[in-house]
Image (tube, rainbow, N blue to C red):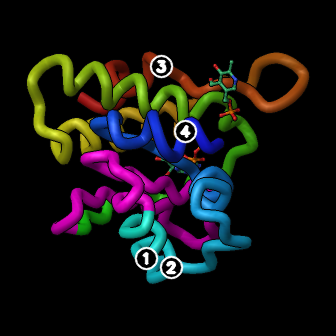
Amino acid sequence: MEALQQDLLPLAYMITPNIPEACRLLGIDQIRNEAEMQEAAKRLHELGPAYILLKGGHMQGERSVDILYDGRNMELLEAPRIDTPHTHGTGCTLSAAITAELAKGRSALEAAAAGKEYITAAIRHALAIGGGIGPTNHAAYRLYNN
Ligand SMILES: Nc1ncnc2c1ncn2[C@@H]1O[C@H](COP(=O)(O)OP(=O)(O)O)[C@@H](O)[C@H]1O
Ligand SMILES: Cc1ncc(COP(=O)(O)O)c(C=O)c1O
């Protein structure tokens, strides 16, 4: 944790913590609402990354809201909260999609917004396979969003 906070985070272009991860990084017990998410994003930015994408998948409410913060602008990326148990790998899928968009030369905001559309489609069409929590559908954006 100390190496992460002191050595790695200052090198990061963008970090994408979920709510429990953000709490752990900041040494706080909980993040209860959108105002507290914004406050947490500011404090995470002080640890050094250029961009914070604080993900709201673990919050409650009809919208699943992520926050992108660059030290000046606070952008809300919103999507309907989908009622499904099959959310295995959501965070990894989102960060991989954002990385691919950045590699294509998109800005951080463009990449995060595209990643949000990609993960929302992947969750909406998630695969109910296996015995437990199923994976997201990586083909969904291409198949159903165009
Ligand atoms: N039930 C859901 N409906 C819609 N979007 C969701 C849902 N659960 C998670 N997301 C979105 O999936 C992405 C990963 O979120 P999160 O669950 O917070 O991270 P992690 O998978 O790392 O725990 C975020 O964009 C979040 O808003
Ligand atoms: C090895 C590994 N562990 C954990 C996870 C996170 O999975 P989950 O979103 O179900 O927490 C991933 C993402 O796919 C992963 O690749």
Going from the N terminus, do you reach mark 3 or mark 4 first?
4
Q: State the residue in front, 51 or 32.
A: 51
| Contact? badges 3 and 4 (CB < 8 Å) | no
Please rate how many residues cluster around mark 1, counting C-alpha atoms within 10 Å: few if below 14, some from 14 to 19, many from 20.
Answer: few
The answer to whether any part of residue 143 appears in the image is: yes
Q: State the residue in front, 111 or 15.
A: 15
Residue tagged 4: 4
Disc number placed over residue 138 in the picture, else none: 3
Residue tagged 1: 39
The amino acid marked with disc number 1 is Glu
Q: What x and y, as percent, mark residue 133?
A: 79, 32
Quarter containing the C terminus: top left
59 in magenta: yes
Q: State the residue in front, 73 or 3.
A: 3
The amino acid marked with disc number 2 is Glu
| Contact? badges 1 and 2 (CB < 8 Å) | yes
Give me the residue at 31% from left, 24% from top.
99
Residue at disc 4, secondary structure: helix
Q: Which residues are magenta?
A: 44-73
User: Whole-Å distance between the Cαs marked 4 and 2?
Assistant: 22 Å
User: Whole-Å distance between the Cαs marked 3 and 2?
Assistant: 31 Å
Residue tagged 2: 36
The amino acid marked with disc number 3 is His
Quarter containing the N terminus: top right
- 59 sits to left or right of 106: right
